[in-house]
Amino acid sequence: MRLEDVIRRPIVNEKSTLCRRYGNQYVFAVDLKATKQDIANAVSTFFGVKVDSVNTLVMPGKDKRFGRHIGHSNKWKKAVVTLADGQKIEFFDKVDDAAEAAEA
């Protein structure tokens, strides 16, 4: 699996923001076939940080209504990446600064 295909998108919500501030953990949506080693290699390569651990969860798909018809969204994988002490990803700091500026 290519490193570019492992990380789909960052997850930015209230819970992931608290994990980032207090636990030095970052949350990503990743490919379903990606292993923990693949995720750790992709994060360390793309962001230039040292990864301590990776925890993964497979999130179930949900039923969605489209008028009278019921569809189903696909399941997806979430990865919680814990970085070494003193490490951080600058991309998320820029997102936090933009959100604080929008609130003010």
Image (cartoon, rainbow, N blue to C red):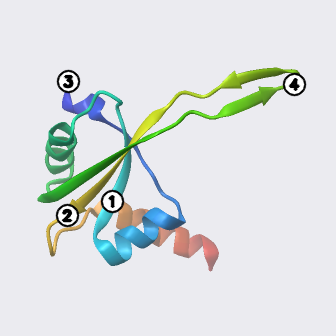
Dot 3 or dot 4, earlier in sequence: 3
Element class at badge 3? loop
Dot 1 or dot 4, earlier in sequence: 1
- The reply to whether discs 1 and 3 touch (Cβ–Cβ < 8 Å) is no
Query: Residue at 39% across / 65% down in the picture?
Result: 94
Query: Residue at 21% across / 48% down in the picture?
Result: 43
Q: Residue 45: x percent and y percent? A: 14, 45
Dot 2 or dot 4, earlier in sequence: 4
Outermost residue, right side: 68
On residue 1, the disc is: 3
Distance CA(mark 1)–CA(mark 4): 37 Å
Q: Residues within 10 Å of mark 2 (few under 14, many from 20)?
A: many
Distance CA(mark 1)–CA(mark 3): 22 Å
Distance CA(mark 3)–CA(mark 4): 38 Å
Distance CA(mark 2)–CA(mark 4): 44 Å
Query: Residue at 76% across / 23% down in the picture?
Result: 70
Q: Looking at the image, is 34 positioned above or below residue 93? A: above
- The reply to whether discs 2 and 4 touch (Cβ–Cβ < 8 Å) is no
- The reply to whether discs 2 and 3 touch (Cβ–Cβ < 8 Å) is no
Read off the residue under disc 4.
67
Q: Looking at the image, is 26 positioned above or below residue 62? A: below
On residue 83, the disc is: 2
In the image, which is nearer the foreground, mark 3 or mark 4? 4
What residue type is disc 4 on?
Gly
Read off the residue under disc 1.
26
What residue type is disc 1 on?
Tyr
Query: Residue at 22% across / 35% down in the picture?
Result: 35
What residue type is disc 3 on?
Met
